[in-house]
Image (cartoon, rainbow, N blue to C red):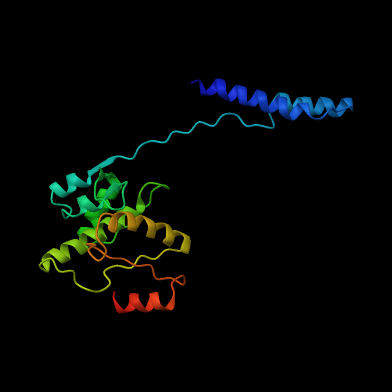
């Protein structure tokens, strides 16, 4: 496939389409319009953009083997095609995500600035989940009640989007009530009963 050839054909077809349905009688206007066509005013030149890959920070499995993450993270953070199964391709983290995990575990505050679609959410979700898993393990496998983290989003749309992602990781493959880490959305979208339940069972 020659993308430049395709681009040329698309432009030619578009030019034929836009110039065929109007016949300009005034010669001056006709020359002006023809000049616009020749200069390509109606369509920009091709835009080429490189999309470099982010540096790898290792897979979740590798971080588990290195003792950086709790073993249950390997089952949680994978691409699960089936909501009823824990089976799926393992997740490979970017370098900035792995660095954020280590920074969080050190107890230090950190700020992560990187592009859209680079996995910023996992840079704080993974450390939160890992901390809950470790706390449960230290308590003999019994999960301690209470709110462990609060994530604030500027818009409900973002909160709803992240809610879907959390369900994929923390609910898919686990029986109802058997999830290793629980979560809830608390915004103006919940019913009074749902908000009361969240407050009663943090």
Q: Residue at coordinates 35% horizontally, 37% vertically from top-left?
A: 53
Toward which corner of the image does residue 142 lie, by quadrant?
A: bottom left
Residue 180 screen position, x and y as percent: 22, 62
- Residue 192 in view here: yes
Tell me if 116 is positioned left or right of 38 in this view: left
Q: Residue furthest left?
A: 140
Nearer-the-camera pick, 33 or 65: 65
Q: Residue furthest right?
A: 26
Locate residue 39, reporting x and y percent. 70, 26
Q: Is residue 155 visible?
A: no
Task: Say which of 91 and 87 sits in front.
Answer: 87
Position of 160 compared to 177: left or right?
right
Quarter of the image for the C terminus: give it. Answer: bottom left
Vertical side of 103 occupied by 136: above or below: below
Residue 186, image x, y percentages: 39, 71
Name the image quarter holding residue 124. Answer: bottom left
Q: Is residue 28 above or below residue 166?
A: above
Q: Residue at x 69, y 32 (%)?
A: 42
How many callouts does the rendering have?
0
Q: Is residue 103 left or right of residue 160?
A: left
Residue 91 against residue 182 in the figure, above or below: above
| Residue 192 % position (x, y) | 43, 78
Q: Residue at x 76, y 27 (%)?
A: 19
């Amino acid at each position: 496939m020659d993308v430049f050839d395709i681009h040329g054909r698309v432009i030619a077809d578009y030019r034929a389409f836009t110039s065929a349905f109007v016949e300009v009688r005034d010669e001056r206007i006709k020359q002006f319009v023809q000049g616009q066509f020749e200069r390509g005013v109606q369509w920009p030149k091709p835009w080429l953009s490189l999309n470099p890959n982010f540096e790898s920070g290792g897979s979740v499995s590798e971080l588990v083997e290195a003792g950086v993450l709790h073993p249950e993270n390997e089952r949680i953070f994978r691409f699960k095609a089936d909501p009823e199964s824990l089976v799926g391709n393992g997740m490979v983290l970017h370098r900035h995500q792995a660095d954020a995990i280590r920074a969080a575990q050190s107890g230090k505050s950190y700020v992560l600035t990187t592009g859209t679609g680079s996995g910023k959410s996992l840079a704080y979700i993974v450390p939160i989940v890992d901390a809950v898993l470790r706390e449960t393990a230290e308590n003999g496998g019994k999960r301690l009640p209470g709110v462990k983290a609060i994530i604030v989003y500027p818009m409900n749309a973002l909160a709803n989007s992240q809610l879907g992602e959390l369900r994929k990781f923390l609910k898919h493959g686990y029986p109802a009530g058997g999830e290793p880490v629980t979560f809830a959305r608390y915004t103006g979208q919940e019913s009074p009963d749902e908000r009361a339940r969240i407050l009663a069972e943090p």
